[in-house]
Amino acid sequence: MARKPADQSVNQQDILIAAADVLQRNGYEATTMKDIAAEVNLTAASLYHHFKNKDALLLAVLEAGLELVISRLEPIMRSDKSCDQQLREMIGVHIISLTENTAVGAAMVFEIRSLMASNGSGSAAEVTRRKKFFARRDYFENLYRQVIQKGVEQRIFRAVDVPIFAKTLLGAHNWVSVWYKPDGRLNGQQIATMMADTFLQALKF
Amino acid sequence: MARKPADQSVNQQDILIAAADVLQRNGYEATTMKDIAAEVNLTAASLYHHFKNKDALLLAVLEAGLELVISRLEPIMRSDKSCDQQLREMIGVHIISLTENTAVGAAMVFEIRSLMASNGSGSAAEVTRRKKFFARRDYFENLYRQVIQKGVEQRIFRAVDVPIFAKTLLGAHNWVSVWYKPDGRLNGQQIATMMADTFLQALKF
DNA sequence: AAATTAATCTAATCTTGATTCAATTATAGA
DNA sequence: TCTATAATTGAATCAAGATTAGATTAATTT
């Protein structure tokens, strides 16, 4: 086996992953630079070599998590499958992403609020970046609204209030990242299937 | 009009309500004693006359919120209505509680995690109190499981994985407290109706 | 291998927020 | 009114955690 020194210099990716874990576990405010540093065997001070500050680091985590899901949702949207099939697959990859990648959960559920709280503060560039994150967050939610809307128009789904239905769906998903435990009774795939069944059923005439 | 001095001594209730607001707005860690005190025109120091410390105060908020929903759910459970009717009503009072009382949202969604993080620390009495809160939280979730289970057994609902369905339902509900705005397009009652429709539909054969 | 740049570290600084204390003011009852 | 208790406060204490500064070590380049 090729040698793989245990203590090597760490890159941003490593830090992001570590930060995502701590973030999802403890939440924005309760996450300390020291905690994150410890996960990658560094001191808090060292993190500042890689990221401007705590806000920038954590926002990077949220961005990565959000982009990951979006990148998995878009191909499904672009496919020519039927709306119900598209929605089923979207729910699938979303839940799987949530259960496999802590950054996704962090991005979706909790830290939004901390981000909004810290809004306004910081440099113009930072404010812009946060705005952009929120815009992406909206775009993400819109992907769901679009499929649902399309399905309703095509009479594949019953008439529902699209924004509310989307929120309902997202809330259910987000919550998975809170209660899901890798060693639980069901794995991500199984949970995804059940939740997809639930919402597809809810959309039937 | 009877005189009503603006500056009167404040009671625990006032503080709990103020704290619930700040808590839901900013989250456990980001909520400062000063913030809470400001809402009731007191200084941070004064709060210690009413509550042992920050943890005790915030836990009291969570307890109050949780007990409020439970107290509204239990009568419905005890009624002899059909399962689907019971579930519909439960969803109704739950959502309404969430939109009308910030403490409820706080209790359900966010602060649980902060509470778990602080677990183990504190006096034996504090640990016991936190455990009790979690037990009540489980009891609450069980109310939903019970109705769903009963409905499945009575063939009123299709066969679903009860724990997962309950989590799905609760996630959707909890999320309402995050996005609901009193001045939004729909009021709590309307949202409740739509969400009840969604989940009842999802349980149909 | 000298020079340069990247990655880390330790120690110091600064700020914020919880908590405590002693003193003050308000209220209720005798 | 006098007194005991309840509320409240400003000032002081303490600790945690983010950030910075300067020095050191590792890795790369030439």
Image (tube, coloured by chain):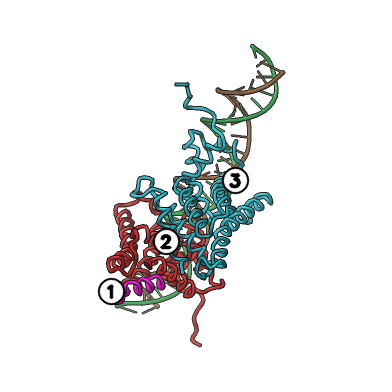
Chain colours: A red, B cyan, C brown, D green
Eye-nearest disc, 3 or 2? 2
For mark 2, what is the residue?
B198
Mark 3 belongs to which subunit?
B
Instruction: Tell me the kind of residue under disc 2.
Output: Thr
At a point 50% along the width and 37% down the height, the residue shown is B37
- Picture coordinates of residue A74 (x, y %)? 31, 71
- Could you classify mark 3 by the number of other residues whose Cα lies within 10 Å: few (under 14), some (14-19), or many (20 or more)? some
> A41 or B73, which lies in front?
B73
Instruction: Tell me the kind of residue under disc 1.
Output: Arg
Residue B186 among magenta residues: no
For mark 3, what is the residue?
B56
Q: Quadrant of the N terminus of chain B?
A: top left
Residue A76 among magenta residues: yes
Inter-mark Cα distance, 1 to 3: 51 Å
Q: Are marks 3 and 2 on the same chain?
A: yes
Inter-mark Cα distance, 1 to 2: 27 Å
Above or below — where is B115 with respect to B1? below
Which portion, as a residue range, is magenta? A75-93
Inter-mark Cα distance, 3 to 2: 38 Å
Eye-nearest disc, 1 or 3? 1
Mark 3 falls on what kind of element? helix
At a point 41% along the width and 65% down the height, the residue shown is A202
Q: Check residue A78 in the rendering and tell me which mark sits there, or answer none.
A: 1
Mark 2 belongs to which subunit?
B
Above or below — where is A121 with respect to C28? below
Q: Is residue A31 visible?
A: no
Instruction: Tell me the kind of residue under disc 3.
Output: Ala
